């Protein structure tokens, strides 16, 4: 359950990548061949930006070369000859990875050489550490040379094809005793150039404390008439390209080319080198970082500190009769941390936007934080309400730091009609977990306004504002889109029945909270009449949905298109069923019917479970871009993990635990079947063609999966700060001793809650 896994020959699956990240800003990813990029933000990419389509084709990687006699071999696996060796089975690799480190061992039987490369980002540093060990597996001794070749991009992602060459003219490359630094003079932007504020660097040392002997800092010099996978400098053993410490070259593409002295390796002998690549704002930062990694012993300590940190950040663990599920849950529990740090961008599939999270992400990620680190949540929640506007809409982009918001993405103002729903859903969980109702009486400002109001006022405003935007069928208008961003072409007459259910539930529960608040704080000016009004509004909306939107086929209509027509005619969408069940609109008889219909129309076990919708067989320009996607991909009928998990959550909430468990089980079994999912452990955004997991790691599905397992499956809930355990574990989940347990923080201590098949429950405090 520590998250460590191994895979033989991971390169046999194209498109694999693994995240490495720090708390201080560096965001990286690595492939089995050490491809992938590294950056702090959109304007500071250390390595060339990579999207999924060029991830494996790009030969610009963290390459480590070994040269002896007439042989040239890449310890990273990226050389022209090794592609042939790989296909012929002459070269083999094995991946080991955990939270959060990456280790790849590679062995070439033809050349009788092997490597092991440990890669990680210290949790508190803006640099990557690569500990590269070379092993002579031959029966003869060899004199070997070690050379790094890491192209340093050192600019904004915008410059990938916008002034790519011109921005290289800004480079100022310096050779230091320890490695190569590049300090661009400017950050190029025709809207207003900024003075360069970063040093991009590659440094290295051998295990015996020796720095490189000479260097190549110019990419073109190194490649010559060859390529990054067969560079002329190494193939032809060029001597004139190598320079010594103190040399400088301006205006060229920069390479982190470090050449170490020859060393003799006896049969079976090994030699280790430590290479770091990073981004710093000044010389002192580099020197401070350097003092932490310049021996294998230091690297070992740095790695252990990093592993310990990340395990502490995601402390929830479970034990059932299914070890594979328990292991999967460990990674799912860590994914909300990855999204906190990466946002919704900066991994190869997530190549949209310019970083940061959106409004909806902010609130849903808090769900996981509430379970793992509840002590951190109060100031975060209060700050988040600063993004609410006076009209009940909100800023859509989260800025750096607490409570900082931006109006919208790329200057395009849009209103997602579901945005007002999520804050109360999250705040309600916070109040139940902590008993802290007084947070509702805290004051907060409104976005781009001098006006202030209580958090309760913000919440009422958001939900009532959405409720009052009703369409011709009395459902809440879809506006620019709801949770499904791809329903973006029905702004005039489109309506979201799905989120009408969600808002109805919000109005009722918010009204009930107002009554509870007034009872416990009678002298604080709480308007009980307002609570009753909200309850009546929500109940009335639920009654309308039951009367108007239940279809003869036995499930709910989910939407109306821009021509005012329901998305019905036998077609089923999962979203409408989820919120009808979760919010209490659907009766028990209706839920049973929905489960039957979903199993018939949406369930595809070969792709991870419940598809988001049936095939409409048309490009619905009156509804959204979703219908232009190939069916079975992304929002058009893929098994979209987020909504599939919310379906499970809704079923558990309404007492349909067996059906909820099956929905979760389909997802974890698909995710953990590497031959089908082609992803490392964890839950992806969706499963596409052939059941492959796509858009891995940065998905709100992880927060909801965590929440569902903890609160519904294991039943660890709270009522105004008082712990309650109401498990819905299935018989097959209990081990041979008839028990299952969950380890979880509760009110400042770690608790292990042991649940017996017999019904007995034991709560043990740890530490």
Image (tube, rainbow, N blue to C red):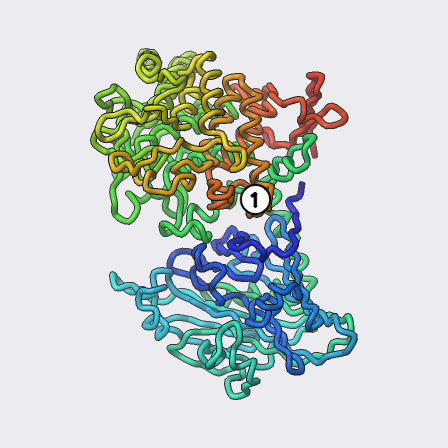
The quadrant of the image that shows the C terminus is top right
Q: Is residue 567 visible?
A: yes
On the image, which quarter does residue 248 sit in? bottom left
Secondary element type, mark 1: helix
Q: Nearer the viewer, residue 738 or 337?
A: 738
Which quadrant: the N terminus? top right
- Left/right placement of residue 372 relative to residue 483 reads right
Image point 58% across, 42% down: which residue?
Answer: 331
**x then y, percent, for residue 731:** 67, 22
Which of the 4 quarters of the picture holds residue 268? bottom right
Q: Position of residue 710 (x, y in %)?
A: 58, 28
Q: Is residue 744 above or below residue 246?
A: above
Q: Quadrant of residue 530?
A: top left
Q: 10 Å neighbourhood of mark 1: few (<14), some, or many (≥20)?
A: some
**165 on left or right of 314:** left
Q: How many marks?
A: 1
Residue 750 screen position, x and y as percent: 64, 32
Q: Is residue 622 above or below residue 99?
A: above
- Above or below residue 761? Residue 152 is below
Residue closest to the eye, 447 or 47: 47
Task: Give x and y (percent) for residue 266.
Answer: 77, 76
Give the side of residue 447 with respect to residue 673, left or right.
left
For the view shown, which residue lies furthest in the bottom direction?
240
- Please tell me which residue is depicted at 56% across the width and 56% down the height of the picture: 121
Determine the residue positioned at 49% across, 25% down: 599
What residue sits right under mark 1 in the picture? 676
Camera-nearest residue between 524 and 547 = 547
Q: State whether residue 456 appears in this view.
A: no
């Amino acid at each position: 359950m520590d998250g460590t896994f191994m895979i033989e020959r991971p390169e046999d699956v194209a498109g694999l990548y693994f995240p490495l990240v720090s708390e201080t800003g560096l965001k990286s990813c690595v492939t089995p061949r050490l491809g992938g990029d590294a950056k702090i933000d959109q304007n500071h990419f250390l390595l060339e930006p990579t999207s999924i389509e060029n991830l494996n084709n790009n030969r610009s990687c963290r390459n480590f070369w070994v040269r002896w006699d007439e042989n040239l071999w890449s310890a990273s696996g990226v050389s022209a000859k090794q592609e042939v060796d790989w296909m012929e089975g002459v070269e083999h690799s094995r991946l080991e990875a955990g939270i959060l480190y990456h280790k790849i061992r590679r062995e070439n039987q033809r050349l009788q050489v092997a490597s092991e490369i440990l890669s990680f980002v210290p949790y508190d540093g803006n640099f990557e550490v690569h500990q590269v060990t070379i092993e002579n597996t031959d029966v003869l001794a060899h004199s070997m040379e070690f050379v790094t070749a890491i192209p340093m991009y050192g600019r904004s992602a915008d410059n990938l094809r916008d002034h790519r060459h011109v921005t290289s003219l800004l480079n100022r490359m310096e050779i230091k005793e320890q490695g190569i630094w590049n300090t661009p003079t400017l950050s190029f932007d025709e809207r207003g150039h900024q003075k360069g504020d970063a040093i991009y660097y590659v440094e290295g040392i051998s295990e015996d404390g020796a720095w490189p002997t000479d260097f190549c800092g110019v990419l073109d010099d190194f490649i010559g008439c060859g390529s990054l996978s067969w560079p002329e400098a190494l193939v032809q053993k060029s001597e004139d390209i190598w320079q010594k410490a103190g040399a400088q070259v301006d205006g060229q593409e920069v390479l982190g080319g470090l050449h170490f002295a020859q060393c003799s390796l006896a049969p079976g002998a090994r030699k280790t080198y430590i290479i770091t690549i990073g981004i710093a704002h000044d010389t002192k930062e580099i020197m401070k970082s350097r003092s932490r990694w310049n021996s294998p012993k230091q690297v070992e300590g740095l790695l252990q500190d990093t592993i310990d940190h990340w395990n502490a950040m995601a402390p929830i663990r479970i034990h059932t009769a299914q070890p594979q599920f328990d292991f999967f849950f460990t990674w799912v529990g860590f994914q909300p941390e990855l999204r906190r740090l990466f946002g919704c961008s900066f991994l190869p599939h997530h190549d949209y936007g310019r970083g940061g999270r959106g409004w909806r992400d902010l609130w849903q990620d808090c769900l996981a934080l509430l379970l793992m680190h509840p002590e951190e949540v109060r100031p975060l929640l209060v700050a988040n309400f600063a993004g609410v506007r006076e009209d009940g809409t909100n800023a859509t982009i989260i800025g750096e730091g607490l409570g900082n918001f931006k109006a919208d993405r790329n200057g395009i103002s849009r209103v997602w009609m579901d945005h007002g729903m999520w804050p109360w859903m999250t705040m309600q969980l916070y109040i139940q977990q902590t008993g802290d109702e007084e947070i509702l009486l805290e004051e907060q400002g409104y976005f781009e306004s001098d006006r202030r109001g209580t958090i309760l006022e913000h919440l009422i405003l958001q939900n009532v504002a959405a409720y009052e935007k009703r369409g011709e069928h009395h459902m809440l208008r879809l506006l620019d889109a709801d949770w499904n961003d791809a329903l973006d072409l029905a702004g005039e007459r489109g309506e979201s029945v799905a989120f009408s259910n969600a808002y109805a539930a919000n109005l009722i529960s918010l009204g009930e909270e107002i009554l509870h608040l007034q009872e416990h704080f009678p002298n604080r000016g709480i308007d009980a009449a307002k609570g009753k009004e909200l309850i009546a509004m929500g109940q009335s909306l639920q009654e309308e949905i039951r009367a108007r939107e239940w279809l003869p086929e036995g499930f709910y209509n989910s939407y109306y298109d821009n021509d005012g027509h329901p998305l019905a005619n036998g077609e089923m969408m999962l979203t409408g069923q989820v919120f009808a069940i979760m919010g209490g609109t659907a009766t028990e008889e209706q839920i049973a019917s929905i489960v039957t219909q979903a199993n018939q129309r949406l369930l595809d076990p070969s792709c991870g479970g419940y598809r988001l919708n049936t095939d409409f067989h048309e490009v619905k320009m009156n509804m959204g871009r979703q219908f232009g996607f190939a069916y079975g991909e992304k929002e058009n009928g893929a098994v979209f993990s987020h909504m599939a998990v919310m379906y499970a959550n809704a079923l558990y909430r309404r007492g349909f635990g067996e059906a909820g468990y099956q929905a979760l089980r389909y997802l974890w079994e698909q995710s953990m079947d590497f031959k089908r999912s082609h992803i490392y452990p964890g839950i992806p955004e969706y499963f596409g063609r052939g059941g492959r997991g796509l858009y891995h790691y940065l998905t709100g599905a992880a927060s909801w999966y965590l929440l569902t397992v903890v609160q519904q499956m294991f039943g660890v809930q709270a009522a105004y700060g008082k712990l309650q355990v109401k498990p819905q574990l299935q018989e097959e989940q209990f081990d041979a001793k008839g028990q299952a347990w969950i380890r979880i923080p509760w009110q400042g201590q770690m608790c292990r809650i042991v649940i017996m098949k017999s019904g007995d429950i034991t709560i043990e405090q740890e530490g």
